[in-house]
Amino acid sequence: MMKGERIKLFVDAHCFDTEYQGMQTFVCGLYREILHQDTMDIYFGTDNADNILKAFPGLPPARVLMYKKRKPSVLRYLFDIPGILKNNGFHYAHFQYMSPQPVRHCKYIVTMHDVLFNDFRSSFSWQYRISRNLLFNRSMQQAAIKTTVSDYSGKRISRHFNIAEEQLAIIPNGISSMFGAGFSRSDAREIIFKKYGLDNFILFVSRIEPRKNHLLLLEKYLELELYKQNISLVFIGQQSIPVAALQKRISQLTAGQQLFFRWFEQVDQQDLEAFYRSCRLFVYPSKAEGFGIPPLEAAVCKVPVLCSNTTAMQDYGFFKPFTFDPENEVEFGNQLKAILESPVSASRLESIAEEVLEKYSWKNSAAAFCKLLV
């Protein structure tokens, strides 16, 4: 790259082609901020241009490079992406977790969000673990720039893939100050009540898979008989990995309990923000996260949060004393009961929101990321 030449960067954005996941939040938040800067030309690879143009308003359609809709979709790493990189003269290409074989004159940036499949083996199939270790390790080893999203993930990647921690740049997720700010709490409650018939509810936003620990929340909700207090429980998230015990427990709900339990696989963005703003309590009982975005989104919406204190969520000290060990069912039950009986004050919620926004800023993350490009 010549001195003074604009950086030409390709972003593999296939994560926008599937169900919602944390990678979308990372790519969207990071590049919305970078696109404000006039220092580089950024292109996105996808097989669904509409999703990219929706995620990045104002992006010229010519900056969206299409993959062929191959089956299996991983063939994009063998054919589509190498061809795009060779034919367009990119200086850098940014991938989440996995990259193709190197292309001459193009430096690869690989962001590895976590290696939870190694630390929590029982939550993943052996086929999943073996394939990810082979493909992700190869991608990280050959990357010119290696990044991750948290100190926790950095330490685990270093251990499992034998990469020195100083080689891993920490580029955290950020939280937008505008998340949930489009309406007041009263307006949000009105929206959710009119559209979904819900008021006075506990919320959990996450994909369904074993490590997310939905069953713990459902069991304690039922044990405390919160439905008898007219408190509903709401799950929002698609099922990524079947959880037989959760499905069985849901099927056993009585008719009365069913009236107060709702599971939405997906809602639109405006409704999601309204759910956050209007909930009585947000609970995040996950056993393992490489970062953990939803409790921070709830925090900036200024609602009470009861959050797991393990893995990357150890950094969320601002939620204390309402944190818990997700392996300790008794502690969780006591904390759930306590936060419902002694709500967090408005001033404390305001303070938590300010701390989250100060610590997790897309502007800061984008600046740190851009410094890596030389």
Image (tube, rainbow, N blue to C red):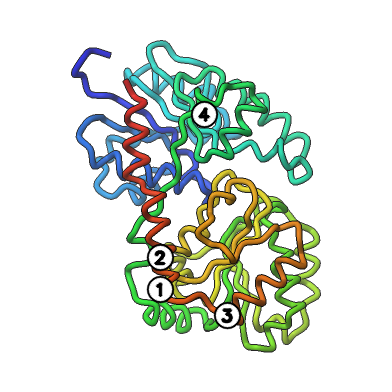
Q: Residue at x 34, y 42 (%)?
A: 364
Label 1, on which residue? 347
Q: Nearer the viewer, residue 56 or 280?
A: 280
Q: Are marks 2 and 4 in contact (CB under 8 Å)?
A: no
Label 3, on which residue? 342
Q: Residue at x 23, y 38 (%)?
A: 37
Label placed on residue 203: none
Residue type of the residue flagged with mark 1: Ser
Q: Is residue 312 visible?
A: yes
- Name the secondary structure under disc 2: helix
Is tag 1's residue or tag 3's residue first in the polypeptide sequence?
A: 3
Q: Quadrant of residue 153?
A: top right
Question: Depth-wise, is mark 2 or mark 4 nearer the camera?
Answer: 2
Is tag 3's residue or tag 4's residue first in the polypeptide sequence?
A: 4
Q: Nearer the viewer, residue 261 or 150?
A: 150
Q: Residue at x 54, y 38 (%)?
A: 151
Label 2, on which residue? 351
Q: CA distance from mark 3 to mark 4?
A: 52 Å
Q: Is residue 327 above or below residue 110?
A: below
Label 4, on which residue? 76
Residue type of the residue flagged with mark 4: Arg
Q: Decide: few, some or many residues near mark 4? Use Cα within 10 Å; few <14, some 14-19, many ≥20.
A: many
Q: CA distance from mark 4 to mark 1?
A: 50 Å
